[in-house]
Image (cartoon, helix red, strand yellow):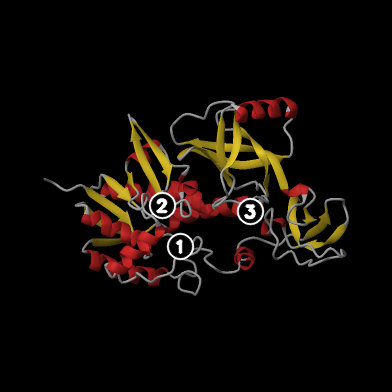
C-alpha cells in the first residue's frame, strides 16, 4: 500500500522535530521543509536561520527523512512585514504571527507541499483538527498552557482539511520527554521566543530601523502634560516599561501605563496604576472577520474570547454588524484591549475564528439593553 506523503515544516526546534519523528513512526512518507522567511541580519545574535538550518539537517538525518530549504522571504516581506509596518505607522499593534500562519505557513508552504505531491502538511503547533461531517474544526490543544489555536484562527476549511498537528493531544512535557528518550540532536534546545525578525532584541531599536520618529506630547488622562513620547508607533496599550516616567509628580509610587493614543493630535495618554479604569473595556469592535467554519457565530449567543495570546477565556456575547464586522460585549471588563491585535472567539474547545480589534469602549450605545441581554444569557 502506498504511504501517504506529508510535508512537515521543521524549524530546528524541538516541537517540529518531534512532530516529524512521530509521523515517521506512524508510517507516513515524511518530507521535511525548512522555511527561510527573513534575510535581513539573520546571522546575528537575535535571529540565526543559519544555526536553525544546521539543527534541521541533523534532525532530518536522525529521523531518516529528506529535507528541503525554501526561501519565502520575499512573500513574507510583501504579505506580512509590510502590513506589520503599516499597522504600527497607524498607531495600532499588529500580531505578525497570525498573518504569517495564514499567508506563509499555511498558504505558500501548503502550495509548495502540494507541488511536491503531498496530500497533507504538518507543523509543530499545539492545536487539533477534528472532522465533523463534511466540515473541519480547529480545536484548542490538550495542553492549555501551550495552546496555539489563537494564532491559527484565520485558516480556512481548505487549509484545515490538509493539515495535521501531531502534538495537539500531547503535553509539552511529553514532547520534551520523547526528544530526550530518543536522543534527538536538538533535544536540549530552548524554545524560540517571538517571531524571527524581532527575536529577543529590543523592540523599539528594531522598529526604529524601519519607521521614522514623530515626537509628541505625553499627557495624563486629565490633560496634564507629563513629557514627550518618541512616536505613537513605538508604544502599545497597557505598556509599562519604556515610558520613562517612574513615579512622575506623584507620591503613590504606582507605575505608569499607556492608556490611549490620539492619532490626530499625536498624543500619548498615560494613567497610573495597573487597575486604572481607563485601562479596561467592556466592549470591542472587530473588523476583517475570518470564520473558520465558513459561517459567522450566532447573534446574541454566549461564547468566550481572547483579546491577546495567553489571556484567560473571557465570557462575551457576539453581535453581528456586517459580513466583516462584529462586536463583543464582555461579562467582565477586559484589561488593555488593543486595536490591531486579534480577538479570537471560542465555543468550548472549538475555535470559531475572529478578527482584528479596531475600537474599544467602556459602554455600548445601547448599554442598558445589551447588559440586560448579557445577564439573561449568562443566567440561562
- Residue 234, which numbered label? none
User: Does any portion of residue 261 appear in the rendered image?
Assistant: yes
Q: Look at the picture and state if 16 lies above or below 127.
A: below
Q: Which residue shows up at 32% across the image and 51% down it?
A: 166
Q: Which residue is mark 1?
A: 38
Residue 236, horizontal then vertical, whole percent: 67, 55
Looking at the image, residue 333 sits to the left or right of residue 62; the answer is right
SS for callout 3: helix
Which of the two discs, 3 and 1, labels the residue nearer the N terminus?
A: 1
Residue 125, horizontal then vertical, whole percent: 40, 53
CA separation, marks 3 and 1?
A: 19 Å
* Residue 349 vs residue 319, the one in the foreground: 349
SS for callout 1: loop
- Residue 88, which numbered label? 3
Q: Which residue is mark 2?
A: 126
* Residue 333 vs residue 165, the one in the foreground: 333
Residue 132, horizontal then vertical, whole percent: 34, 32
CB within 8 Å, label 2 to label 3: no
Q: Look at the picture and state if 119 lies above or below 317.
A: below
Which of the two discs, 2 and 3, labels the residue nearer the N terminus?
A: 3
Residue 65, horizontal then vertical, whole percent: 22, 61
Amino acid at each position: 500500500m502506498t504511504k501517504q506523503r506529508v510535508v512537515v515544516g521543521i524549524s530546528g526546534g524541538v516541537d517540529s522535530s518531534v512532530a516529524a519523528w512521530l509521523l515517521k513512526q506512524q508510517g507516513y512518507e515524511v518530507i521535511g521543509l525548512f522555511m527561510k522567511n527573513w534575510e535581513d541580519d539573520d546571522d546575528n545574535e537575535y535571529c540565526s536561520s543559519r544555526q536553525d538550518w544546521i539543527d534541521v539537517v541533523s534532525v532530518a538525518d536522525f529521523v531518516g527523512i529528506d529535507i528541503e530549504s525554501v526561501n519565502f522571504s520575499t512573500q513574507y516581506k510583501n504579505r506580512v512585514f509590510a502590513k506589520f509596518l503599516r499597522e504600527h505607522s497607524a498607531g495600532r499593534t499588529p500580531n505578525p504571527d497570525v498573518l504569517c500562519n495564514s499567508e506563509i505557513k499555511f498558504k505558500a508552504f501548503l502550495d509548495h507541499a502540494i507541488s511536491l505531491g503531498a496530500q497533507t502538511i504538518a507543523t509543530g503547533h499545539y492545536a487539533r483538527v477534528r472532522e465533523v461531517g463534511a466540515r473541519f474544526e480547529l480545536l484548542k490543544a490538550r495542553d492549555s498552557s501551550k495552546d496555539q489555536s489563537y494564532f491559527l484562527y484565520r485558516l480556512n476549511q481548505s487549509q484545515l482539511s490538509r493539515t495535521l498537528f501531531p502534538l495537539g493531544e500531547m503535553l509539552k512535557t511529553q514532547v520534551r520527554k520523547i526528544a530526550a528518550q530518543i536522543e534527538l540532536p536538538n533535544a536540549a534546545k530552548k524554545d524560540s521566543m517571538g517571531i524571527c525578525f524581532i527575536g529577543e532584541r529590543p523592540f523599539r531599536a528594531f522598529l526604529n530601523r524601519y519607521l521614522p520618529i514623530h515626537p509628541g506630547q505625553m499627557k495624563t488622562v486629565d490633560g496634564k502634560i507629563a513629557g514627550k513620547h518618541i512616536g505613537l508607533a513605538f508604544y502599545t496599550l497597557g505598556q509599562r516599561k519604556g515610558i520613562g516616567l517612574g513615579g512622575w509628580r506623584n507620591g503613590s509610587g504606582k507605575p505608569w501605563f499607556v492608556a490611549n493614543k490620539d492619532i490626530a493630535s499625536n498624543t500619548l495618554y498615560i494613567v497610573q496604576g495597573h487597575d486604572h479604569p481607563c485601562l479596561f473595556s467592556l466592549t470591542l469592535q472587530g473588523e476583517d472577520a475570518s470564520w473558520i467554519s465558513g459561517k459567522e457565530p450566532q447573534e446574541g449567543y454566549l461564547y468566550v474570547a481572547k483579546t491577546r495570546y495567553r489571556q484567560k477565556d473571557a465570557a462575551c456575547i457576539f453581535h453581528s454588524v456586517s459580513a466583516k464586522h462584529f462586536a463583543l460585549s464582555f461579562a467582565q471588563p477586559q484589561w488593555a484591549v488593543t486595536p490591531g491585535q486579534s480577538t479570537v472567539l471560542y465555543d468550548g474547545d472549538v475555535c470559531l475564528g475572529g478578527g482584528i480589534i479596531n475600537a474599544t469602549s467602556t459602554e455600548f450605545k445601547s448599554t442598558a439593553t445589551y447588559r440586560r441581554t448579557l445577564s439573561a444569557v449568562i443566567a440561562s
